[in-house]
Every structure is written in C-alpha cells, then in structure tokens.
Amino acid sequence: MAESKKRKRKSGEVAEQDTEVHSWTEDIPMSPSWWAPAFITLLIVGLVWVMVYYISSARFPIPGISWWNLVIGFGIMLIGFLMTLRWR
C-alpha cells in the first residue's frame, strides 16, 4: 500500500500546541444555590396540583374554578421547566 507524503515544515515554523481548551460556557455565570431547589419544587408542586385536581374529581385544590386548576398546575410546571433552561 502506498504511503502518504509527509508535509515539510518551513524553516522557523513551530507547530501550535492545542493544549488549552476554552469552553463556550466560561463567560456564563453560575446559577445561585437556590435555583435548582426552586425549579424542582415548582415542578413537583405543579404536578401535585394537577394530581389533586384529578383525584378529587375537580373539587380541589380551589373549588369553583373547575378546569382553571389545570391551567394553574401546568403554569406552575411551565415556570419550573423554564427555570431549568437557565440553570448552570
């Protein structure tokens, strides 16, 4: 099998070292310590809200607003999910 030709360096040319790796996330600040517990709590509270609505046959968590309880529960979960996108 034929061997590929080696590139010749020009005199005085030094090979660059790729030992330094720069991450694209270096300039993004870290999230505060309360961020992760807050979004996890919101996700769980929203889920429990929707579960209580279904289990109680639309009598709880807030009686009288019927399916708006679903909107509230999913809204709480949506806020928690959007917080996960900003977490670092």
Image (spheres, rainbow, N blue to C red):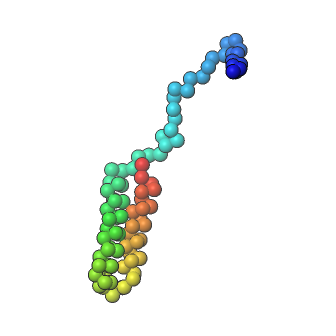
In percent of width and height, residue 37 lies at: 31, 56
Along the line of sight, the residue nearer the viewer: 19 or 8 = 8
Is 14 displayed left or right of 47 in the figure? right
Counting from the top left corner in percent of width and height, residue 52 is at: 29, 76
- Which quadrant, please, contains the N terminus? top right
Eyeballing the image, is 70 above or below 40?
below
Q: Identify whether 80 is placed above or below 23.
A: below
Count of numbered labels shown in the rendering: 0
Instruction: Look at 48% across and 40% down and name the residue there.
Output: 26
- Residue drawn at the location 37% of the way across and 73% of the way down: 73
The answer, for residue 27, to whether it is visible in the render is no
Q: Is residue 83 left or right of 10 when viewed as pictured?
A: left
Q: Position of residue 68 (x, y in %)?
A: 39, 81
Q: Is residue 64 visible?
A: yes
Residue lying furthest bottom in this view? 64
**Residue lying furthest top:** 11
Q: Position of residue 85 (x, y in %)?
A: 45, 56
For this orientation, the residue located farthest to the front is 1
Q: Image quadrant of residue 6?
A: top right
- When the figure is inspected, residue 45 is found, relative to residue 24, above or below; the finding is below
Above-or-below relation of 40 to 12: below
Residue in view at x 51 percent, y 28 percent: 20
Work out whether residue 1 or residue 59 is closer to the camera in this orientation and state it: 1
What residue is drawn where x is 32% and y is 65%?
44
